[in-house]
Image (spheres, rainbow, N blue to C red):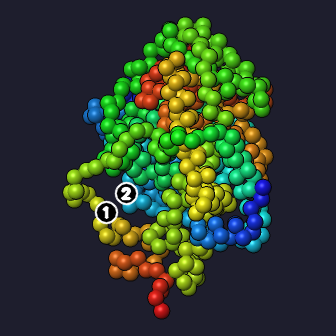
């Protein structure tokens, strides 16, 4: 059978269960696809074919014994900042280029327990700092829809690998939009769960009060299946929350009758917005209305301050988190340095790329003596106001609908010299991280120059089922999620 | 707004980074632009607003002080750039 790599997770599950295909056939098909298109897309940092084939063989044995688990035999890719025991985890950084974790992240334990097949580790912006994957210290990933455009970031490899059918689903992480934005740019589904829903144990930390792991997938059902596997309380992550996990897939009824969808007036301006994005989002609003949902005008008055607050809070946390890369316990060391301080400085300067150094400097500045109140504390107070905006909005509506990004994927190299412009492209996604609420992106259109456009749905704390179900309703009524790039 | 060379070098020292001479000016301009942009926050009066340091309200996560599974010593030093007999080796600190 050909084209097995094109299957969704739920389609593959049905065929595996009915023994129409084997996990080994499926996994081989994915590796054939990787061999064919990876040279043009550059999504993978490490391909783990030996591990995958062994896992697929074990999956086939399980299937033959009717021991079928939630992801038995399903080939998935993992962002290269999630620790994988015995497999290099580079964070796309020179400083961790040869780091081999001695343990698995909790999400890896969960994937393994669910029977998943790990295809490899995928590219990203170095330490997840970026919106284009151009900040990778290893390679630049291309958008499968147009190889001269960025795939988005920081989970650019996770999105490109799913979009190009080089895996059936993937894991990414989202600190300011790093799952939703690349999902939008590559025409796939991505969800950032509520802060605390998924354990971050074994996730290399960027900004600890914002980071969250989530899935990228070919459709909403697959996203629900993956989220089900990775969710849950973990005593090893002190920010993890002990709360019942709903059955995400069972919640996908497609019924949005009387669902109140908030339309934030601040997000729906034509100011700096691509007309293609505006019209795709407008069409989505009309579709929901036709499906029986009620559109409600809401206000998020402090959203205009989100970018500024985020680019103080995230770098401040990052500069603390990245203090651990000192050349002593793991990672790169500049062995020529004679003194300890020289060794620290030379190691870090050689190991970190320019964007990471820029954010470390920015965060250090914001936390330094005399500036703490003016910058970090001020930003944290504004974070409270942004959070209150959402709480008030959710009194009037069930979910919030908005664009994911102001425009489709830009060209590689277009914004590299202008970090501030790059930061401003995160304007619609950052607020969900600051507030800790869940948000997802689903394909909702194609631009005139044939690039995917995403729709963002945000929900109240732990209301992943509500946004997934609304996304499912949209997906049932449209064909955008079925479109694949021609490679 | 542009940071001074002295400010960039001071922050770099705090962050334990050596900034290449050729990049000091670029960083001074870029950081200045970003800091100028974040000044928009000053338009908002936040007197009396409590700061949010954590997205979801949660107090300390306590656990029993019990021995649990842990890495063995060999695994813990397996990634050390320089290691000797289970110890991390660093350049000499005291003359």
Within 10 Å of the Cα at label 2, are there few (<14), some (14-19), or many (20+) other Cα atoms? some
In the rendered image, the quadrant that contains the C terminus of chain A is top right
Of residues A373 and A97, the one nearer the viewer is A373
For numbered disc 1, what is the local secondary structure? loop
Residue at position x 61%, y 57% from top? A371
**As displayed, is residue A236 above or below residue A264?**
below
Mark 1 and mark 2 residues within 8 Å of each other at the beta carbon:
yes
Q: CA distance from mark 1 to mark 2?
A: 8 Å
Of residues A193 and A89, the one nearer the viewer is A193
Picture quadrant of residue A240:
top left
**As displayed, is residue A330 above or below residue A283?**
below
Residue at position x 51%, y 59% from top? A320
Q: Report if residue A92 is visible in the image.
A: no
Q: Extreme front residue here?
A: B47
Residue at position x 56%, y 34% from top? A386
Q: Extreme bottom residue here?
A: B95
Which residue does the numbered mark 1 point to in the structure image? B71
Which residue does the numbered mark 2 point to in the structure image? A103
x, y percent for residue A270 = 77, 25
Query: For this view, does A391 lie left or right of residue A282?
Result: left
Of residues B14 and A133, the one nearer the viewer is B14
For numbered disc 2, what is the local secondary structure? loop
Residue at position x 58%, y 63% from top? A369
């Amino acid at each position: 059978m050909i084209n097995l790599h094109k299957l969704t997770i739920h389609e593959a599950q049905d065929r595996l269960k009915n023994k129409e295909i084997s996990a080994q056939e499926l996994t081989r098909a994915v590796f054939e696809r990787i061999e064919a298109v990876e040279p043009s897309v550059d999504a993978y940092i490490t391909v783990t074919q030996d591990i995958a084939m062994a896992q697929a063989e074990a999956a086939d044995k399980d299937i033959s014994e009717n021991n079928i688990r939630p992801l038995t035999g399903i080939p998935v890719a993992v962002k290269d900042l999630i620790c994988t025991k015995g497999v290099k985890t580079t964070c796309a950084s020179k400083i961790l280029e040869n780091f081999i974790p001695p343990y698995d992240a909790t999400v890896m334990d969960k994937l393994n327990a669910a029977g998943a097949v790990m295809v490899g580790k995928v590219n990203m912006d170095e330490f997840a700092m970026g919106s284009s994957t151009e900040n990778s210290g290893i390679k630049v990933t291309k958008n499968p829809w147009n190889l001269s455009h960025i795939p988005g970031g920081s989970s650019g490899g996770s999105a490109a690998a799913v979009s190009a059918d080089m895996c059936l689903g993937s894991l990414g992480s989202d600190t300011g939009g790093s799952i939703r934005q690349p999902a939008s740019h590559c025409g796939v589904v991505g969800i950032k769960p509520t802060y605390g829903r998924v354990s971050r144990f074994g996730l290399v930390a960027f900004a600890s009060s914002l980071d969250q792991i989530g899935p990228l997938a070919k459709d909403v059902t697959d996203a629900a299946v993956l989220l089900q596997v990775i969710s849950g309380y973990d005593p090893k992550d002190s920010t993890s929350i002990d709360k019942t996990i709903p059955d995400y897939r069972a919640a996908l009824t497609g019924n949005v009758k009387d669902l109140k969808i908030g339309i934030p007036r601040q997000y729906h301006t034509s100011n700096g917005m691509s007309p293609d994005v505006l019209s795709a989002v407008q069409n989505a609003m009309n579709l929901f209305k036709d499906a029986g949902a009620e559109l409600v005008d809401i206000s998020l008055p402090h959203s205009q301050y989100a970018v500024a607050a985020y680019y103080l809070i995230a770098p401040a946390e990052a500069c603390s988190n990245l203090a651990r890369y000192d050349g002593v316990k793991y990672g790169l060391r500049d062995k020529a340095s004679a003194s300890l301080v020289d060794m620290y400085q030379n190691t870090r300067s050689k190991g970190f790329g320019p964007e990471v150094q820029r954010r470390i400097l920015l965060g250090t500045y914001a936390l330094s003596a005399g500036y703490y109140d003016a910058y970090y504390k001020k930003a944290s107070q504004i974070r409270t106001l942004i959070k209150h905006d959402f709480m008030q909005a959710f009194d009037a509506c069930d979910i919030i609908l908005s664009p994911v990004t102001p425009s489709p994927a830009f060209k590689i190299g277009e914004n590299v010299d202008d970090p501030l412009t790059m930061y401003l492209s995160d304007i619609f996604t950052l607020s969900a991280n600051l507030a800790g609420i869940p948000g997802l992106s689903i394909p909702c259109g194609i631009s005139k120059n044939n690039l995917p456009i995403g729709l963002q749905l945000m929900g109240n704390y732990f209301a992943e089922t509500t946004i997934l179900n609304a996304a499912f309703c949209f997906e049932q009524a449209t064909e955008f999620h079925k479109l694949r790039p021609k490679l | 707004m542009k940071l001074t060379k002295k400010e960039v070098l001071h922050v770099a020292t705090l962050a334990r980074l050596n900034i290449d001479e050729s990049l000091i000016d670029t960083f001074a301009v870029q950081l200045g632009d970003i800091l100028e942009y974040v000044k928009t926050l000053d338009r908002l009066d936040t007197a009396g607003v409590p700061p949010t340091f954590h997205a979801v309200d949660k107090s300390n996560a306590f656990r029993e002080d019990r021995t649990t599974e842990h890495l063995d010593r060999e695994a813990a030093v397996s990634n050390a750039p320089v290691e000797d007999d289970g110890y991390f080796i660093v350049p000499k600190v005291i003359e």
